[in-house]
Image: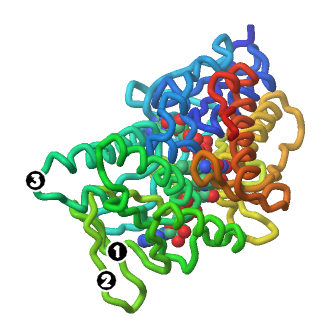
């Protein structure tokens, strides 16, 4: 048995972290390195399904699985703990329960909601981020409906839901909400016409940058289900009673609401910023081999990283698709560094497309350059969701957690 084996520490068991770990155990042998994976919880959650858990259309337990079920436990030391800091110079990670030295570090801590410093959002708005936030938002919405008929003086703000941001997260959440609200109305004896769902988007269009025909389809579909859109209108402030929104050069408007959902983008994990890496909104512009500039033993991937698209000279949007592909490259490159296997691989994203769900049975997307909408897009979205389970946990995990109700 080799003494002083290099220590590889992977932070975060999200899409990027889990792909790295599952591939790394095939790249390096037990005598080559010690592998440690650190994650806050003992489960992985499908961030890409959190709009469903948040609306209450899919139970949160369907969206998570135990990390020990997908890693090779004889090869990977799993530490359930919270990362508090990274000391780059000392090559160590500070956890809530101790410290971990490393020779190679992989940072896959994901993202946090971006509030752009808008007053009151951190305190009063609900993000769509993880199992805990999803469970809280689902329960909160249900409590508003349950409370409505208990009060002598009826409060419309209990039945008003405001969604800030009509990017992919906002639109997917609205799609779920459009299906969930009629169920809640039935359960709590509330007339659907009393419920108001308002989406406030600062850009001149919903899903900025996406195919205009598919954008129109999504907007008409959601409007048909009773969603109101305020386009070119920014959320300016959030209070316990609702939001102030406004168009440029116009008088702001107040919307009274007990439920403000903030879905207006993400920034990299604050621990990455605090560690001293040069970053843009918490994301580190990594080299083509996915190492952090100036730190040859530190790889950063997923939402904490920023990778430039050479064709557009703009960063790729942070997606699970990219995070998973980066995990494969990081595993190969660490294997090469440890075994002295020559030049490191350059990361080349292979973007297969984007599909946004509009509730369980509708969606819009572009896959391999082909536009999809309606049932075919919805089936494709489930295939994508199942594929990501398959990539990490094989057929067993896919059968256990996959989505097979296609119609
Ligand atoms: P994550 O998958 O978020 O994982 C980060 C991990 O780090 C988590 O396990 C977390 O618990 C852990 N962690 C965080 N902080 C700590 C800490 N201090 N200590 C220890 N552990 C910690 N992308 C797509 O490609 N397709 C989609 O359809 C899609 N849909 C989406 C839908 C929604 C509602 C949202 C919010 C995002 C969606 N995305 C989608 C984007 C995608 O989810 C992210 O890009 C992806 O999750 C990033 O992966 P990651 O590995 O960087 O981080
Ligand atoms: P985003 O940055 O893609 O969209 C945020 C939206 O909020 C933008 O349209 C922006 O104009 C708007 N906004 C910003 N400030 C605002 C304000 N003050 N008031 C009103 N609107 C405001 O963020 P997202 O939707 O959270 O997505 C995050 C990442 O996850 C993206 O990379 C996205 O591609 C990815 N994602 C992908 C899918 C999918 O592929 N199905 C689903 C969800 C998220």
Mark closer to the chain start, 3 or 1: 3
Q: Quadrant of residue 277?
A: bottom right
Q: Which residue is mark 1?
A: 236
Q: Which residue is mark 2?
A: 252
Question: Which residue is drawn at the image coordinates 59% and 18% (left, top)?
Answer: 68
Q: Label 1's element?
A: strand
**Mark 3 or mark 1: which is in front?**
3
Q: Position of residue 253 (x, y in %)?
A: 30, 80
Question: Which residue is drawn at the image coordinates 69% and 48% (left, top)?
Answer: 378
> Where, quadrant-wise, is the C terminus in this rendering?
top right
Position of residue 178 in the picture relative to residue 361 (left or right) = left
Mark closer to the chain start, 2 or 3: 3
Residue 241 in the image: above or below residue 148:
below
Q: Given contact means CB atoms under 8 Å apart, are the residues at marks 3 and 1 in contact?
A: no
Q: In the image, is the residue at mark 1 within 8 Å of ligand 2 by its beta carbon?
A: yes
Residue 326 in the image: above or below residue 64:
below
Residue 10 in the image: above or below residue 188:
above
Q: Which residue reaches farthest top? A: 1
Q: Given contact means CB atoms under 8 Å apart, are the residues at marks 2 and 1 in contact?
A: yes
Return the residue nearer the eye: 122 or 292: 122
Q: Position of residue 158 (x, y in %)?
A: 25, 56
Separation of marks 2 and 1 at Cα, in angstroms: 8 Å
Quick one: label 2, few (<14), some, or many (20+) residues within 10 Å? some
Q: Quadrant of residue 96?
A: top left
């Amino acid at each position: 048995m080799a003494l002083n084996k290099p220590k590889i520490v992977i932070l975060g068991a999200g899409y990027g972290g889990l792909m790295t770990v599952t591939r790394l155990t095939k790249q390096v042998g037990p005598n080559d390195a010690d592998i440690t994976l650190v994650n806050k919880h003992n489960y992985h959650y499908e961030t890409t399904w959190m709009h469903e858990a948040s609306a209450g259309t899919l139970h949160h337990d369907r969206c998570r699985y135990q990390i020990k079920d997908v890693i090779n436990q004889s090869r990977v030391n799993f530490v359930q703990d919270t990362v508090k800091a990274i000391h780059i110079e000392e090559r160590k990670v500070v956890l809530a329960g101790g410290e971990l030295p490393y020779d190679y570090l992989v940072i896959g801590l994901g993202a946090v909601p971006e509030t752009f410093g808008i007053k009151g959002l951190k305190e009063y708005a609900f993000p769509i981020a993880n199992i805990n936030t999803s469970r809280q938002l689902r329960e909160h919405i249900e409590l508003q409906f349950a409370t409505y008929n208990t009060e002598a003086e009826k409060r419309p703000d209990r039945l008003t839901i405001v969604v800030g941001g009509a990017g992919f997260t906002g639109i997917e959440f609205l799609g779920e909400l459009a299906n969930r609200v009629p169920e809640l109305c039935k359960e709590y004896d509330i007339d659907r016409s009393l419920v108001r769902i308002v989406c406030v988007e600062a850009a001149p269009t919903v899903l900025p940058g996406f195919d205009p025909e598919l954008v129109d389809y999504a907007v008409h579909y959601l409007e048909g289900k009773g969603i109101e859109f305020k386009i070119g209108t920014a959320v300016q402030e959030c209070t316990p009673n609702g939001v102030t929104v406004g168009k440029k050069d116009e008088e702001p408007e107040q919307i009274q609401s007990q439920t403000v959902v903030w879905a207006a983008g993400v920034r990299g994990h604050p621990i990455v910023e605090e560690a001293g890496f040069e970053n843009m909104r918490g994301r580190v512009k990594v080299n083509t081999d996915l190492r952090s500039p100036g730190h040859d033993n530190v790889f950063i991937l997923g939402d904490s990283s920023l990778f430039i698209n050479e064709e557009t000279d703009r960063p790729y949007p942070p997606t699970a698709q990219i995070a998973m592909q980066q995990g494969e490259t990081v595993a190969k490159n660490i294997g090469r560094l440890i075994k002295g296997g020559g030049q490191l691989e350059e990361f080349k994203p292979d973007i297969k497309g984007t599909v946004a769900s509009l509730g369980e049975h509708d969606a819009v997307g572009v896959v391999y350059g082909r536009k999809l909408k309606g049932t075919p897009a919805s089936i494709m979205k489930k295939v994508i969701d199942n594929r990501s389970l398959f990539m990490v946990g094989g057929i067993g995990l896919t059968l256990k957690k996959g989505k097979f109700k296609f119609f």
